[in-house]
Image (tube, rainbow, N blue to C red):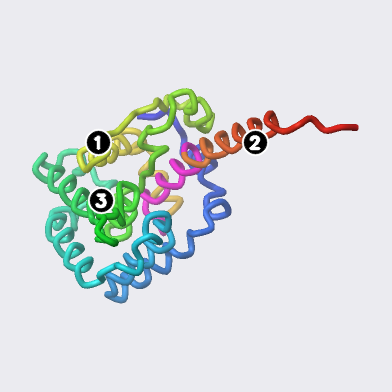
């Protein structure tokens, strides 16, 4: 458990929507999903929040085939439809259920499109977590390479100080469904003590989304800013000195 208060938790994530310009597209995808347009909701999310991969295969994208994969994914994951991340039952679910979550994650993240004879990934590790969160927003949490611990160890000294002070430590998760399950369990251990107060103060936003915003602002954005600053210093060092 992280030694973090709800006030600190909220202060880390308070500027998320200002920093993440794609946030409205997630809401649009959610609205499509509510209207029963599951495939369309997923494709909009891929085209906006997973653009780096999706742009290379959009002209080869087979919506019908993708829809079949989505249906297979949802059939695997049906065991968690009535469970929420905040429920006490989350960590006591049988390991067979967590194994299904890992399998469903891998079904999505391994989805590829044949593009001129090459198998190009469309969704990937980060995209799979986004789609799972979109479909089950009260259960799944988004992650990315920064949160998975894929960056150089020294860079993680730049994590939001409130997180570091709370006892946050660098964890490197496996790049598959098993790693994603480990991440979910760790998030439950880290933040579950905040659930009662969070639910009272923020009844309209899933706790999973709030955790995502904390992770994004406190880890991803903090490390990206440090990387930009480092690149800026290198560029300045490589320039010829100004002549006055």
Q: Are marks 2 and 3 in contact (CB under 8 Å)?
A: no
Between marks 2 and 3, how big is the CA–CA gap? 33 Å
Number of callouts: 3
Task: Determine whether the residue tagged by mark 1 lies in a helix, strand or loop.
Answer: helix
Q: Is residue 131 visible?
A: yes
Q: Quadrant of residue 203?
A: bottom left
Along the polypeptide, which appears first: circle 2 or circle 3?
3
Q: Quadrant of residue 194?
A: top left
- Main SS of the magenta segment? helix
Residue located at (17% from left, 58% from top): 73
Few, some or many C-alpha atoms within 10 Å of disc 3 (few <14, some 14-19, many ≥20)?
many
Residue at mark 1? 182
Q: Earlier in the sequence, mark 1 or mark 2?
A: 1
Under circle 3, the secondary element is helix
Front residue of 58 and 134: 58
Tag on residue 232?
2
Q: Is residue 118 magenta?
A: no
Magenta span of residues: 203-219
Q: CA distance from mark 1 to mark 3?
A: 16 Å
Residue placed most toward the observer, 153 or 129: 153
Mark 1 burial class by Cα count in 10 Å: few <14, some 14-19, many 20+: some
Q: Residue 33: horizontal and vertical position, in percent?
A: 31, 70
Instruction: Examine the rendered structure and indicate whether residue 65 appears above or below residue 97.
Output: below
Mark closer to the chain start, 1 or 3: 3
Specify the quadrant of the image occupied by residue 226. top right
The label nearer to you, 1 versus 3, is 3
* Residue at 19% in and 43% down: 89
């Amino acid at each position: 458990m992280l030694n973090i208060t709800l006030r600190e938790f909220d202060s880390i994530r308070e500027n998320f929507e200002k920093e993440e310009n794609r946030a409205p597209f997630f809401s649009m995808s959610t609205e499509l999903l509510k209207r029963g347009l599951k495939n369309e909701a997923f494709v909009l999310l891929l085209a906006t929040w997973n653009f780096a991969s999706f742009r290379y295969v959009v002209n080869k994208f087979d919506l019908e085939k993708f829809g079949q994969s989505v249906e297979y994914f949802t059939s695997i994951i049906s065991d968690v439809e009535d469970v929420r991340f905040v429920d006490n039952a989350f960590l006591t679910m049988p390991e067979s259920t967590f194994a299904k979550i890992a399998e469903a994650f891998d079904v999505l993240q391994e989805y590829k499109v044949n593009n001129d004879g090459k198998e190009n990934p469309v969704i990937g590790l980060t995209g799979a977590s986004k789609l799972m969160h979109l479909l089950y927003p009260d259960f799944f949490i988004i992650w990315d390479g920064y949160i998975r611990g894929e960056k150089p160890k020294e860079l993680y000294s730049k994590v939001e100080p409130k997180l570091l002070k709370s006892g946050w430590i660098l964890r490197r998760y496996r790049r598959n469904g098993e790693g994603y399950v480990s991440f979910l369990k760790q998030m439950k251990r880290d933040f579950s003590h905040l659930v009662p107060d969070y639910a009272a103060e923020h009844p309209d936003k899933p706790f999973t989304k709030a955790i995502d915003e904390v992770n994004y602002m406190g880890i991803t954005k903090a490390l990206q800013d440090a990387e930009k600053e480092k690149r800026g210093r290198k560029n300045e060092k490589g320039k010829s000195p100004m002549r006055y």
